[in-house]
RNA sequence: GCAGCCGUAGCUCAAUUGGAUAGAGCAUCUGACUACGGAUCAGAAGGUUUGGGGUUCGACUCCCUACGGCUGCGCCA
């Protein structure tokens, strides 16, 4: 009897069927299946409690009735018991565990099993989104890391995912920058070209600072910078070329970071792309009466809202220029019309919650008034990366820490550690391992906690490799691969014929954990919170380590050996699949 | 001032959104057979979930209130 990938949904379906045979489903019976505390079972159904309360029934008697009405196959697959006021507990029988493990025997099969959940859906994930002409810093880390994990999770559950880097490539900063560029070129063209050839983005950053400084000190320079901006906006060929060069250089530098984090965007549609699409927004919002003039600007109020009744959503400044509210509205429309998305996830700092709330509220009314179907819009917010002083992480001199420097340091620290732990490995291999461990540690530290809160960035905790860290998980992978290597077996084609169902306490605990992979992925994806998957992988690695310590794998008894090799192999593919879903690379040894 | 988020073990964090005895890791303490990697495993100890009130079969979770912290609030994105 085959089981589907997602065992909890299988139980949910069976319980609904039982409920409907009893005439409960029409009255609103919901099974409420979830993963249970191992002390009680593998899965539990809590729905009888809420339903009995609503219908003034005896909850335990109701639960018993539902259990008695379950189809026979389900009762063959699980040990079922009632507990407490009316919880229904399900424990997978060993043969059922063996059946699931037999079916899901490769990353491809895990993938195809999971891919039914969101097949046919199209999602756009808006993440990273740095400003051009500046280097990326720690403030850009979380959006990139969380966003990429969400892309992979959504794709794994079957959605068509579009990765969109909504870069800030069109702002007032370009006036000052172009002005400073021209000044520098006039002063010493060769020196400028030389500096730009060597460190292009760093040089543009220096030029911007110089321009900003000069403009603040001298109103005439400010006017000159503004004039350069107007020329750029009017399509002046020279300024346009400088602007293009800045963006090219910026994107090339960003890609060096993205390569380390496993990120590749499908589209890079920044603010400049929407520049000519905002007039339509003004016209539509004015026409339906959503937008109004206020102090010379075009704004949207939401009278029913406690804050936004008074706090305006400014969609056109009084000087007539667009801002990010206008381009964000144009972006929603473009994603609807051009990509025809079902959902969009905006992976953006919690400090922009007001803006996102206003954007979504405005879009909802606007789409409703114009008969469009609004996609599911999600603000995937996240907290700040703090230093050990509980303040936003900065360098000692108070500067933002460059992402490039941060990743360099992570790899270097990992190298020190790998060299200490695996001194016998050749240097080149230690370097390669450290590159993976270092970057993975940074990614995992970010992903493994609830994104909503701030988190404290501590090198020692992150790379110390104890507890819930990337290294602990990578180590578990390396140990499994080591078993296959030592036994001269192919980890991709393990000899598992004749494997018997799990038997010892640690085998059973590991097998149960493996089956729950589906729930962890579903939870992380539906809540758009990768830390649920991290927690699961940590627990899986723990269950494996306990099994490894208790049960020897390479034993003489062929049935025992086959089933333990099977457990090793399934743990390997689930761990690797899970880590890849988070955007981490894995290792054969470390 | 108005609004949003938050406050859980000494420290860093969980708790499937109202479910069973609030769980992990670090740090501390006690143990582990020459077994495939000890970057490991088994165990102990650690809590009035910031204080107070309320809602109900049941509250870290929802409501009210006080205190403490972070954040946002008309033309930067």
Image (cartoon, coloured by chain):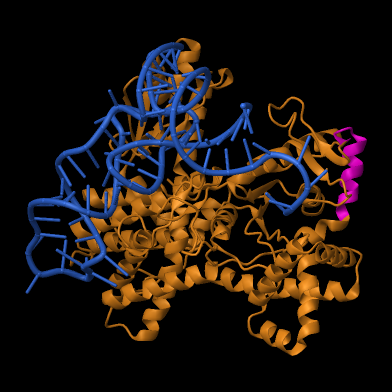
Residue A489 visible, this orientation: no
- Residue drawn at (42%, 79%) of the image: A432
Q: Relative to A384, is A429 on the left or the right?
A: left
Quarter in which the C terminus of chain A is drawn: bottom left
Chain ID for blue: B
Q: Residue furthest bottom?
A: A190
Please state if A194 lies on the left or on the right of A397 as rendered: right
User: Magenta span has A569?
Assistant: no
Q: Nearer the viewer, residue A497 or B66?
A: B66
**The N terminus of chain A lies in quadrant:** top left
Which residue is located at x 91 percent, y 68 percent?
A235
x and y, in percent, of residue A126 in the image: 66, 54
Q: Nearer the viewer, residue A20 or B67?
A: B67
In the displayed structure, A384 sits above or below B39; it is: above
Q: Name the residue at 65% across, 61% down.
A: A130
Q: Is residue A457 visible?
A: yes
- What segment carries the magenta color? A277-293
Q: Is residue A279 magenta?
A: yes
| Residue drawn 70% across the image and 73% down it | A207
> In front: A164, or A306?
A306
Percent position of residue B55, x then y: 46, 11
Residue A288 placement: quadrant: top right
Residue A241, percent from left and from top = 83, 76
Chain A in the picture: what colour? orange
Q: Main secondary structure of the magenta part?
A: helix
> Is residue A492 left or right of B34 when viewed as pictured?
right
Q: Is B20 rendered above or below residue A567?
A: above
Q: Is residue A311 left or right of residue A57?
A: right
Residue A430 percent coordinates (x, y): 36, 80
Q: Is residue A211 above or below residue A27?
A: below
In this rendering, is residue B67 above or below A186?
above
The count of marks equals: 0
């Amino acid at each position: 009897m085959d089981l589907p990938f997602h065992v909890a949904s299988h139980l949910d379906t069976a319980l609904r069927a039982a409920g409907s045979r009893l005439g409960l489903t029409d009255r609103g019976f919901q099974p409420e299946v979830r993963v249970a505390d191992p002390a009680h079972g593998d899965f539990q159904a809590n729905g009888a409690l809420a339903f009995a309360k609503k219908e003034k029934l005896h909850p335990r008697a109701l639960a018993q009735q539902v259990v008695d009405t379950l189809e026979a196959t389900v009762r063959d697959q699980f040990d079922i018991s009632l507990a407490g006021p009316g919880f229904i507990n399900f424990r997978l029988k060993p043969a059922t565990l063996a059946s699931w493990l037999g079916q899901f025997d490769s990353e491809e099969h895990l993938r195809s099993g999971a891919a039914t959940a969101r097949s046919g859906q199209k999602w756009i994930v808006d993440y990273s989104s740095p400003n051009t002409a500046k280097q990326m810093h720690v403030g850009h880390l979380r959006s990139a890391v969380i966003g990429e994990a969400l892309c992979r999770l959504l794709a794994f559950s079957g959605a068509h995912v579009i990765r969109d880097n909504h870069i800030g490539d069109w702002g007032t900063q370009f006036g000052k920058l172009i002005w400073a560029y021209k000044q520098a070129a006039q002063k010493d063209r060769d020196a400028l070209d030389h500096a730009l050839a060597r460190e292009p983005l760093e040089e543009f950053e220096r030029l911007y600072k110089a321009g900003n400084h000069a403009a603040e000190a001298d109103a005439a320079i400010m006017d000159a910078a503004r004039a350069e901006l107007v020329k750029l906006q009017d399509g002046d060929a020279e300024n346009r070329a400088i602007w293009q060069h800045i963006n090219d250089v910026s994107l090339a530098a960003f890609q060096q970071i993205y390569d380390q984090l496993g990120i590749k965007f499908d589209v890079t549609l920044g603010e400049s792309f929407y520049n000519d699409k905002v007039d339509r927004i003004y016209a539509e919002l004015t026409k339906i009466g959503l937008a109004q003039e206020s102090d010379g600007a075009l704004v949207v109020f939401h009278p029913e809202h406690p804050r936004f009744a008074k706090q305006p959503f400014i969609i056109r400044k009084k000087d007539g220029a667009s801002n990010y509210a206008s381009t964000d509205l144009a972006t929603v429309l473009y994603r609807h019309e051009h990509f025809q998305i079902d959902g969009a996830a905006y992976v953006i700092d919690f400090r922009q919650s007001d803006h996102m709330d206003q954007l979504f509220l405005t879009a909802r009314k606007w789409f409703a008034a114009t008969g469009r179907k609004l996609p599911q819009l999600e603000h995937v917010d996240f907290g700040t990366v703090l230093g050990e002083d509980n303040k936003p992480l900065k360098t000692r001199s108070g500067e933002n820490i460059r992402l490039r420097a941060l990743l360099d340091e992570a790899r270097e620290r990992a190298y020190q550690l790998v060299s200490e732990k695996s001194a016998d490995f050749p240097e080149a291999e230690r370097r390669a391992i450290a590159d993976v461990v270092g970057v993975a540690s940074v990614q995992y530290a970010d992903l493994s906690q609830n994104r909503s809160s701030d988190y404290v960035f501590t090198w020692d905790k992150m790379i110390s490799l104890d507890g819930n860290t990337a290294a602990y998980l990578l180590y578990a992978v390396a140990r499994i691969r080591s078993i296959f290597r030592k036994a001269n077996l192919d980890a991709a084609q393990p000899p598992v014929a004749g494997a018997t169902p799990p038997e010892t306490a640690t085998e059973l605990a590991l097998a149960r954990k493996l089956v729950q992979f589906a729930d962890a992925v579903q939870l992380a994806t539906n809540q758009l919170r990768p830390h649920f998957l991290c927690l699961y992988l940590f627990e899986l690695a723990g269950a494996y380590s306990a099994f490894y310590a208790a049960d020897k794998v390479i034993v003489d008894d062929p049935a025992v050996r086959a089933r333990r090799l099977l457990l090793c192999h399934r743990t390997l593919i689930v761990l690797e699949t899970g880590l890849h879903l988070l955007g981490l690379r894995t290792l054969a040894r470390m």
